[in-house]
Amino acid sequence: MKSIITVRSEFDFRGETFCYESDIDLPDTIDDIDLFLEQLPSRIAKLNDLDVISYKFEMLESSEMEVVKFQSRIASAIPNLPMRVERFLELYQEIGPEAYLQEIAENYQIDLQANPHIAKALRAAYELGNEHKHKEKPVNTNTWF
């Protein structure tokens, strides 16, 4: 199951309130949170057919964005939604590996407290998998090409 967040941005523009929501796929780990946050407004605009060369897009870029929904195998690890996207990503990075480890252990009925060597082996396998996975190409935010 892929991890998916629903991101919402709400802002006022020319006397109207606009609310954009988009489902965004999350990788297991985010290598560069700043880059992810920089690309997020463009991804939301694209998913909502919003022209990136517009005042509305500028308002979207400058508005606060929040995660309102989180679908994942580890969704129970981050229960207090909605929250700001920045804070969510920090938590996601912080708890990600351990939450996945705990979820795998529960699925296979492994007591990690009683079997710390298994926990150590699972962590090593997780880290090895992250080291050798293919990197996704960053989303192109330049609309001229």
Image: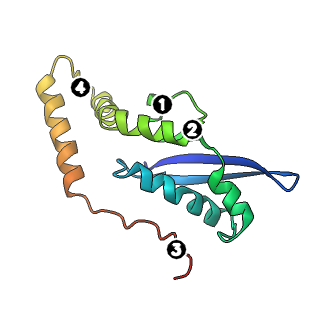
* Label placed on residue 53: none
Categorize mark 2 by other alpha carbons within 10 Å: few (<14), some (14-19), many (20+). Answer: some
Total label count?
4
Tags 4 and 1 touching, CB below 8 Å:
no
Front position in the image: 118 or 93: 93
Sequence order check, earlier mark of 1 and 2? 1
* CA distance separating discs 1 and 2: 12 Å
Task: Give amino acid for label 2.
Answer: Arg
* Label placed on residue 84: 2
Categorize mark 4 by other alpha carbons within 10 Å: few (<14), some (14-19), many (20+). Answer: some
Sequence order check, earlier mark of 3 and 4? 4
* CA distance separating discs 3 and 1: 33 Å
- Name which quarter of the figure residue 36 lies in: bottom left
Label 2 SS: strand
Q: Is residue 73 visible?
A: no
Question: Can you give x and y, in whole percent of width and height, for residue 51 in the image?
Answer: 69, 70
Question: Can you give x and y, in whole percent of width and height, for residue 140 in the image?
Answer: 47, 71
* CA distance separating discs 4 and 2: 34 Å
* Label placed on residue 110: 4
Task: Give amino acid for label 4.
Answer: Ile
The residue under label 1 is 78
Sequence order check, earlier mark of 3 and 1? 1
Residue at horizontal 65%, vertical 69%? 52
Sequence order check, earlier mark of 4 and 1? 1
Relative vertical location of residue 5 with respect to residue 107 in this rendering, above or below: below
